[in-house]
Image: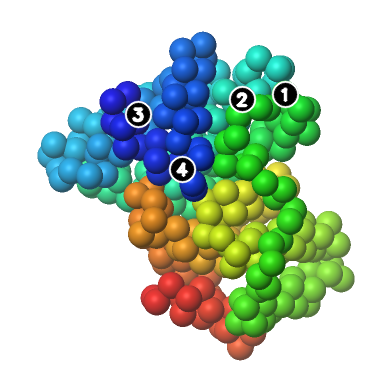
């Protein structure tokens, strides 16, 4: 808890105005909700593990995983029965869970584990399905200014998308149209929505490299898209690879995102192979953006 309240909390903030929320208000709220307390302790232990070398780091990795595993069932139960009392704790835990899911593969590599960042992202996807429910049912109940609540998420900001990124997302849309529009309209629409959200949050990142603008995309996705990622559907993986470019924007700003964008792209390249020149260009763009 000392690590979280003195250092880790800052990695969840995008501005000084959020320090009180994550340093004081959220830990105080965690006294009432074990899943949130266990999430805080897991993240603090993982942060310690990320800053020291093995073998000293191994005990902190084990501790982080133990606390993290304790959060799943009660967090899901809270989301299933969301109410004015537990909605803020559930929303805070959704943010902590996302950060842990992104950080785990790199940190656990210290004990020789080959943890898949794609699999971790799928778990995060599934847990974040509850976030839309929290916002839909409990929006008026949430008073804390967590980073997903600070500003209108649908305001794209004043800056426009750069032409290079715009062209890459147009290419994604074209591939989706050519591959699925006529043979599977449902899957085509699922991908189209994911690309639309990706364009929106890419525009927001152009205005502000803020973790909320990067991570919010995960919470917006349809369950069907998550299933497609799990089934290794190529277009879904290609869209996820383009989101990894946004994740890469957080590298160097937040310890939990270090090398994660590059790692996700590298992992997806192992299972995606160009079917034609358009696919080859689509695969090349994320690599170029993150210098791979």
- Which residue is at the far left? 55
On the image, the x and y values in percent for residue 200 come to: 70, 62
Q: Say which of marks 3 and 4 sits in front.
A: 4
Secondary structure type for disc 1: helix
Q: Which mark is residue 243?
A: none
Precedes in sequence: disc 3 or disc 1: 3
Precedes in sequence: disc 3 or disc 4: 3
Can you say whether 238 is above or below 51 in the image?
A: below
Precedes in sequence: disc 2 or disc 4: 4
Label 2 to label 1: alpha-carbon separation: 8 Å
Left or right for 23, reference 191: left
- In the picture of the structure, the residue carrying the numbered disc 3 is 5
- Label 2 close to label 1 by CB (< 8 Å): yes
Taking the image as drawn, is residue 169 in sight? no
On the image, the x and y values in percent for residue 111 come to: 22, 43
Precedes in sequence: disc 2 or disc 1: 2
Secondary structure type for disc 3: helix
Can you say whether 45 is above or below 283 in the image?
A: above
Secondary structure type for disc 4: helix
Q: Quadrant of residue 46?
A: top left
- Label 3 close to label 4 by CB (< 8 Å): no
- Label 3 close to label 2 by CB (< 8 Å): no
On the image, the x and y values in percent for residue 124 come to: 54, 41
Residue found at x 86% / y 62%: 185
Q: Quadrant of residue 68?
A: top left
């Amino acid at each position: 808890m000392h690590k979280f309240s003195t250092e880790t909390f800052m990695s969840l903030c995008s501005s000084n105005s959020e320090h009180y929320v994550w340093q004081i208000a959220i830990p105080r709220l965690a006294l009432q909700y074990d899943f949130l307390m266990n999430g805080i302790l897991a993240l603090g232990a993982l942060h310690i593990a990320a800053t020291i070398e093995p073998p000293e780091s191994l005990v902190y990795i084990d501790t982080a995983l133990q606390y993290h595993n304790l959060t799943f069932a009660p967090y899901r139960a809270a989301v299933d029965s969301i109410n004015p009392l537990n909605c803020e704790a559930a929303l805070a835990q959704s943010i902590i869970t996302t950060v842990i899911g992104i950080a785990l593969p790199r940190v656990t590599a210290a004990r020789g584990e080959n943890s898949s960042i794609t699999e971790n992202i799928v778990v995060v996807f599934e847990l974040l399905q509850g976030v839309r429910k929290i916002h839909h049912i409990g929006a008026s109940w949430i008073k804390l200014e967590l980073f997903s609540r600070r500003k209108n998420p649908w305001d794209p900001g004043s800056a426009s998308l750069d032409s290079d990124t715009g062209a890459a997302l147009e290419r994604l849309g074209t591939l989706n149209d050519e591959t699925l529009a006529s043979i599977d309209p449902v899957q085509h629409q699922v991908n189209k929505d994911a690309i639309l959200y990706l364009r929106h949050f890419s525009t927001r990142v152009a205005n502000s490299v803020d973790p909320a603008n990067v991570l919010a995309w995960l919470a917006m996705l349809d369950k069907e898209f998550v299933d497609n990622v799990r089934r290794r559907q190529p277009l879904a993986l290609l869209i996820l690879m383009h989101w990894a470019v946004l994740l890469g924007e957080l590298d160097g700003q937040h310890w939990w995102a270090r090398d994660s964008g590059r790692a996700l792209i590298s992992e997806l390249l192992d299972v995606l192979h160009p079917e034609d020149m358009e696919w080859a260009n689509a695969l090349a763009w994320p690599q170029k953006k993150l210098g791979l």
